[in-house]
Amino acid sequence: MITINEHYLKLQASYLFSDIARRVAAFQEAHPDRQVIRLGIGDVTRALPGACIDALHRAVDEMAVDATFRGYGPEQGYAFLREAIARHDFQARGAEVDPDEIFISDGAKCDTGNIQELFATDCRIAIPDPVYPVYLDTNVMAGRTGEFADGRYQGIVYLDSTRDNSYVPDLPKEKVDLIYLCFPNNPTGSTITREQLQAWVDYAREHRALILFDAAYESFIRDDSLPHSIFEMKGAREVAIEFRSFSKSAGFTGTRCAYTVVPRECTAYTRQGGKQQVHSLWNRRHCTKFNGVSYPVQRAAEAVYSAEGQVQTRELTDYYMGNAALIAQAVQELGFHFVGGRNAPYIWISSERDSWQFFDQLLNEAGVVCTPGAGFGRCGQGYIRLSAFNSRENVVQAMERIRRALT
Amino acid sequence: MITINEHYLKLQASYLFSDIARRVAAFQEAHPDRQVIRLGIGDVTRALPGACIDALHRAVDEMAVDATFRGYGPEQGYAFLREAIARHDFQARGAEVDPDEIFISDGAKCDTGNIQELFATDCRIAIPDPVYPVYLDTNVMAGRTGEFADGRYQGIVYLDSTRDNSYVPDLPKEKVDLIYLCFPNNPTGSTITREQLQAWVDYAREHRALILFDAAYESFIRDDSLPHSIFEMKGAREVAIEFRSFSKSAGFTGTRCAYTVVPRECTAYTRQGGKQQVHSLWNRRHCTKFNGVSYPVQRAAEAVYSAEGQVQTRELTDYYMGNAALIAQAVQELGFHFVGGRNAPYIWISSERDSWQFFDQLLNEAGVVCTPGAGFGRCGQGYIRLSAFNSRENVVQAMERIRRALT
């Protein structure tokens, strides 16, 4: 008899986005004349940069001719892309990362979801709250948690990110082995300073722990004092893996390209304490379960690093950050406590009431869709997330409507 | 201390393709004037069909304009592609498969590698020998095997595919829960009849087992009596999952698109015998760990089903099957026992000596690269695989060289 992985049964059904869709649909039905503005989703809305479009067309033309056709590429990605990434995203900032430490993939969701396979099932896992749900769900599926009770899975060390710690979690009091960090944070938009991040690296070195650093939103950092990569920190190469994505930096959510950095020194251990190179484990997983990213897509990602591509992607993120500034300004004028919006495309707003109540008020009175913070973890209760991913016109109108509704 | 998944340490280093590369490099250095012809790899060599190229360009143009830009798509794939697949690949052959039972992915390697996550770690697994190594390696990584000894992993039920059973394994004598089948087979090129496949379906129904049917090479079937899909068999919808790919049918090895069919009736069980819908488990995995296939690539896959695309992809597989016929004819004339080449792009040749010895002879005396069968399992010892994926000119020349070397 074929039996299932029963850990899947522990997963809580994610009602968040279906609940949102249901409430929005009901509102639209009741008010067919009112145009709803969606500031809930974390999906980009603007066209791909011209440099990427040109690179895609050129690569497609190569695929049309036998002589330049490309079949299977290296599972880890083409050298042209890995070299461009190492040079521009790391070496240019003083972070030592070599091209062969970069693994190209089709998404940071896949990478952050798959990485846990390399580690023992009884590792003690630390996960921020609130945070992107993939870290938690993939560990539930792998059997690293107990049942769900009182809004949390047993066996996970939750790293509370609250107003009290300015949304940057404190070092855990208990010993943990695998630590997820995400900065600029999704959903709070909060950032971590060099000193704070160095403290996490030092913790990991002291406890032989490993940090999984999700930097999918680093391209929105505007404050020069903030680190873009954990590999700007001293000693991080032994204890950290970093995830990056072209989804938000270059509008690739529908095009699909991301990458993971695993330094050669990055170390995990056998139960007996024998050192194991995480790079070779990840390489083995990548080669066994993945066949590389679409060739035209890798050429499009390479074009992000051209002179033209750098100007265009900066213009793209600047546009969204212009939206974020407008949202932040409006929220501040309305007197809400909030964080984010300065170095991240998300604004995390304390509503001082139930997340869903505030969601309903904004929908019904302003026709604006947000994301209730409770969907990102227990610490998200009482908050909502507004996203800067929309057109300027829609953002201006949405904030004007919210202003009118709440004053 | 961060500890590793020690099951990874059981994996045998795959020396197959690096060994081949090393031997070819040594030969080239010793004979710089001789041109080596590669009939070892399973990678396509011809340009993408024109219909796919046109669709890619059109989709890229859509991504260049805000109004038609696409961000995140459905994790399961766009309806336009799922509907085309259901209609053309299944319903047209009388197999009942609905669009929402089709999950679009970036590769059959990923899907055949990831599917085992849904099942308990103590399932009894049956895997053909010889076969594509991903089925075995991903189960080793998940801890479903013991150590490697005498050329095999303990705890796996190997399904021997030999000359005695015409390379179609017999039903296992022991009870198994999860059965991998691959037809047309990689590496042997053998096919399964309707009666044989029905017997496997009946076995699975009787024992509440599940069949993972890899049909990545179905587009090379030319014999009308052979089944293309396991869902042409009676009762298969309750006990089978099928994997398909555009890699070989439309030359997508570098473009990346595939799909998996999980019927709604397909059932697995809790330890207590409670029924669980495999469709909902796979959907949960897909949504949690995957973000969908690149939009232009899905449009290219859709174009495979256009009238033009159907003609072009048939022309593409016919070309390779023309190569296969030439290889089969030459091998037959040389007096070797072989299988495949009639409904598959691979020819599996019994060399009646060590695989690597024959490899060396073909390389040194004919300048032709094959794949030693021993790389696909213990039953592959004594065999080599020749692939039809090359230009007609190269195939003609390779077989002429082999003829001269061996006669």
Image (cartoon, coloured by chain):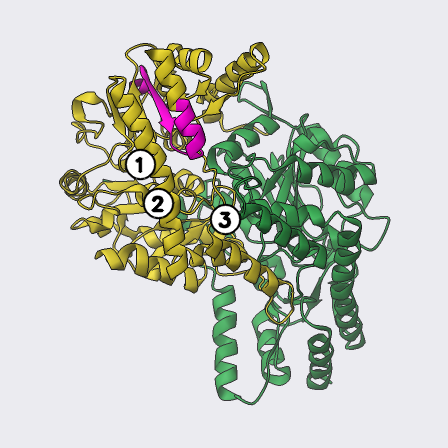
Chain colours: A yellow, B green
Dot 2 corresponds to which residue? Answer: A243
Badge 2 crowding class, 10 Å Cα cut-off, few under 14, some 14 to 19, many 20 or more, is: many
Q: Nearer the viewer, mark 3 or mark 1?
A: 1
Label whose residue precedes the other's in the sequence (3 or 2): 2
Which mark, residue A344? Answer: 1
Q: Which chain contains the residue that carries disc 3?
A: A
Label whose residue precedes the other's in the sequence (2 or 1): 2
Kindly indicate whether the residue at mark 1 contacts the one at mark 2 (C-beta within 8 angstroms).
no
Magenta highlight on residue A390: yes
Q: In the figure, is residue A387 to the left or right of B21?
A: left
| Real-space Cα separation, disc 2 to disc 1, in angstroms | 16 Å
Which mark, residue A289? Answer: 3
Query: Is there any visible trace of residue A74 in the rendered image?
Result: yes
Magenta stretch? A375-398
Q: Nearer the viewer, residue A28 or B335?
A: A28
Q: Nearer the viewer, residue B308 or B205?
A: B308
| Three-letter residue code for mark 3 | Lys
Q: In the figure, is residue B153 to the left or right of B209?
A: left
Q: Residue B275 location, x and y as percent?
A: 60, 20
Whether marks 2 and 1 lie on the same chain: yes
Kindly indicate whether the residue at mark 1 contacts the one at mark 3 (C-beta within 8 angstroms).
no
Which mark, residue B150? Answer: none
Label whose residue precedes the other's in the sequence (3 or 1): 3
Q: Nearer the viewer, mark 3 or mark 2?
A: 2
Q: Which chain contains the residue that carries disc 1?
A: A
Q: Nearer the viewer, residue B59 or A67?
A: B59
| Three-letter residue code for mark 1 | Ala
Kindly state the secondary structure of the residue where label 3 is placed. Answer: helix
Q: At 62% from the left edge and 84% from the top edge, which residue is drawn?
A: B365
| Real-space Cα separation, disc 3 to disc 1, in angstroms | 33 Å
